[in-house]
Image: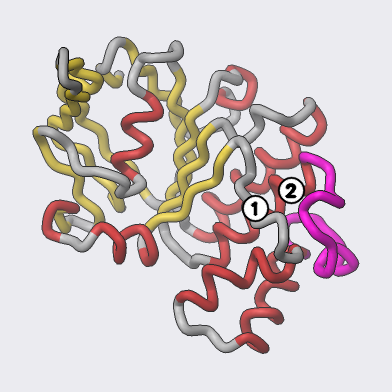
Amino acid sequence: MAVLELQNVKYTYKTQYQSVEVLKGVNQTFEAGKIYAVIGKSGSGKTTMLSLMAGLDLPTEGEILCDDVPMSQMKLEQYRRERVAVIYQSFRLFPLLTVAENVMYPMELRGIKPKEAREKAAELISRVGLSDVMLNRFPGQLSGGEQQRVAIARAMGMDTRILLADEPTGNLDEANSKQVMDILLDLAHSTDRCVIIVTHDLDLASRTDCILHMRDGVLS
């Protein structure tokens, strides 16, 4: 079932001196229960497309639909809070919050009570392969691979059907990259999420259900 659909999506960056068309009519359907890889050279438009799917802006032309509802008819803040979660290459954990507090944060924004949120955080940390002793540690006390798994647990805590990952293994070694990819595959296939990864790692991309190529603003 399609959860996200791009219909002739175009996006143009405008400055005082020039306009640059970054996306040139992207058409693509993304389904629940599948994991997708978007590959392409730097500057090809991958990150711009991911940002639009994350609800950070609207297309210059065309439409993005989530569960058949045009994003232009939604409040983007609500879309970002309720429908999509993003995992970044740089982890973006709150350094002054513990692991548990980082994972609890999006749940508390949704009104979940602290006790329930902490119990759920412990479950999610276990699911991404970390022990409960990590819950009271701070991000600076963790390795890169551990921090990325905490970031995934936090995204899972948002309980959204769409999970976007921007170079999720870019700062990780081969062993940690494999572990992170195993988690993302499990999320797509066992929890019926739609997982979309932007990556330069062709080995990682080869493990996904569908590889999409971005070339000069065109997706194929």
Q: Residue at x 26, y 57 (%)?
A: 76
Q: Nearer the viewer, residue 170 or 14?
A: 14
Q: Answer whether residue 129 is magenta in the image.
A: yes
In percent of width and height, residue 126 lies at 77, 64
The residue that appears at 51% across and 40% down in the rendered structure is 165
Over which residues does the magenta segment extend?
126-144
| Lateral position of residue 126 relative to residue 92, left or right | right
Q: Residue tagged by mark 1?
A: 93
Where disc 2 sits, the SS reads helix
> Type of residue at label 1?
Leu
Is 174 magenta? The answer is no
- In the displayed structure, 206 sits above or below 165; it is above
How dense is the environment of label 1, judged by Cα within 10 Å: few (below 14), some, or many (20 and up)?
Answer: many
Separation of residues labelled 1 and 2 (CA atoms) = 8 Å
Identify residue for label 2.
147
Q: Are marks 1 and 2 in contact (CB under 8 Å)?
A: yes
Which sits earlier in the primary sequence, circle 1 or circle 2?
A: 1
Q: Is residue 49 above or below residue 152?
A: above
